[in-house]
Image (spheres, helix red, strand yellow):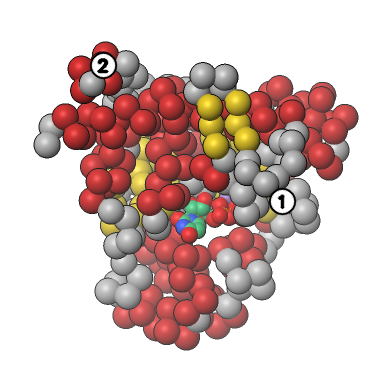
Amino acid sequence: WKGALRSHHFPAVKSSPGDFVSDQAFVTLATNDMYCQGALVLGQSLRNQRATRKLVVLITLQVSSLLRVILSRVFDEVIEVNLIDSADYIHLAFLKRPELGVTLTKLHCWTLTHYTKCVFLDADTLVLSNIDDLFDRGEFSAAPDPGWPDCFNSGVFVFQPSLETHSLLLQHATDHGSFDGADQGLLNSFFSSWSTADIHKHLPFIYNLSSNTAYTYSPAFKQFGSSAKVVHFLGSTKPWNYTYNPQTGSVSKEGSSLVPEQQMTFLNLWWTIYHQSILPLYGSVHDED
Ligand code: UDP
Ligand code: MN
């Protein structure tokens, strides 16, 4: 069966074409093996769209050694960050605000100072077309949040790694906490001029399209949905919480009503990548044991 698996490989090719920019990166975060599934599909979707920047995933101690190996097949760098063992000021911020655990972990992306500019993407996002043009934008660029458009959604943002900014963010977290208990509240109060200062820092909504927007403004979705570049599966039910039938290509969820059609399209895309490109990686790891 191993041979059969191998012949069905859709390898995660790490290509380096001429226009590759090696001092910039797409960055994501996965603190456990479940979110790693999302990170893997995201990474593969960036490769499918011929991303010309490095792919970086931040992980924490909880991520298993198997997933670390698989992540390294898709990402150029797998970097473990550890809240407690890091610099003193992180320790301090964490002790004062233990509820901000995952939030403070996301802020570690500012420490990637071997890159001049980065684009952060949540592990529950999926890239549908090339988004390298995001690197033409400056810090701090993000798209409006669908629930409160004067705030940005922190699932997709352009930033510039800097230890100074990192420590200012941690100081802000220690002093003020986060109004929503997560990174989005903290980042919005830190980059508080986002909604008024510079329209270039407002990313179009198609760079962070919430998968459930079809509900809330369906005519707009009909008009603009097909130009979506990044889909964000925000909310409590993630793509990996659904069940996929590879024979029929159907996605379903136990005990829940019918999945809306527009969401179904995106969930299908997610699962197709997972099935074609990520699952075979598990087989290849066993082959080499
Ligand atoms: N995350 C993680 N582990 C967790 C929760 C969150 O690694 O237990 C990371 C992951 O990259 C995720 C991001 O933090 O995409 C933000 O969380 P989430 O996407 O669940 O929030 P939402 O977008 O639904 O508000
Ligand atoms: Mn998210």
| Coordinates of residue 182 in the picture (x, y in percent) | 58, 66
Name the residue: 73% across, 29% down. 262
Q: Is residue 196 above or below residue 255?
A: below
Looking at marks 2 and 1 on the same chain, the residue that comes earlier in the sequence is marked by 2
- Tell me if 145 is positioned left or right of 129 in this view: right
**Can you see residue 277?**
yes
The kind of residue on which mark 2 rests is: Ala
| Coordinates of residue 88 in the picture (x, y in percent) | 32, 80
| Coordinates of residue 18 in the picture (x, y in percent) | 31, 18
**Closer to the camera: disc 2 or disc 1?**
2
Determine whether the beta carbon of the residue marked 2 sits less than 8 angstroms from the nearest atom of ligand 1: no
Which label number is shown at residue 145? 1
Determine whether the beta carbon of the residue marked 1 sits less than 8 angstroms from the nearest atom of ligand 1: no
Q: Crowding near pointer 2: few (<14 within 10 Å), some, many (20+)?
A: few
Q: Quadrant of residue 19?
A: top left
Quarter holding the N terminus is top left
The kind of residue on which mark 1 rests is: Asp
| Disc 1, SS | loop
Residue at the farthest top position: 7
Residue at the farthest left position: 289
**Can you see residue 191?**
no
Do the residues under discs 2 and 1 have CB atoms within 8 angstroms? no
Q: Can you identify the residue that label 2 sits on?
A: 4
Instruction: Between residue 55 and residue 61, name the one nearer to us.
Output: 61
Name the residue: 27% across, 21% down. 5
- Tell me if 231 is positioned left or right of 13 in this view: right
Q: Is residue 241 above or below residue 264?
A: below
